[in-house]
Image (cartoon, rainbow, N blue to C red):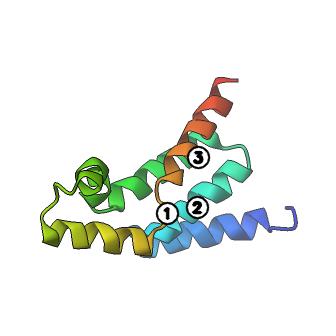
Amino acid sequence: TDLLGDTSAELYYREALNAAPRVPLLVYSYGDFLFRRGRYQEAIDQWQAFVGLAPDIWKRRIQYITGALDPSRQHQYEIFYKLYPNFDLIFDRIEEAEMRLAQ
């Protein structure tokens, strides 16, 4: 194992995900753990699961920007991005992992 304690960290993540498979930050963090170990396809799978756990409101960016969302949805959008201000970066992470897989 390295300084991060790969074996014990892997065990922790697996046990935590067994107990709480729908906790978004846990799913994201495990993807990050896998990515740092060169396990790119597994990281992609975790990050896609993370995106799947998010409410669909993130898909409404154009409507939000143009003011086409009703006030209730607009509020949901704003709350979501207050909770997850860097949410859209996940797509860059997925793309980076896909590029590394292709090498």
Name the residue at 26% across, 59% down.
57
Mark 2, mark 3: which one is toward the viewer?
3
Q: Secondary structure at mark 3?
A: helix
The residue carrying pointer 2 sits among few (fewer than 14), some (14 to 19) or many (20 or more) residues within 10 Å by Cα, namely many
**Residue 100's image quarter?**
top right
For label 3, the residue is: 93
For label 2, the residue is: 30
Q: Look at the numbered discs 2 and 3 and tell me whether their residues touch, using CB distance below 8 Å.
A: no
CA distance for labels 3 and 1 = 14 Å
**Sequence-earlier tag: 2 or 3:** 2
Q: Look at the numbered discs 2 and 1 and tell me whether their residues touch, using CB distance below 8 Å.
A: yes
For label 1, the residue is: 27
| Residue kind at label 1, given as amino acid type | Val
| Residue kind at label 2, given as amino acid type | Tyr
Up-down relation of residue 95 to residue 65 (above or below): above
| Residue kind at label 3, given as amino acid type | Arg
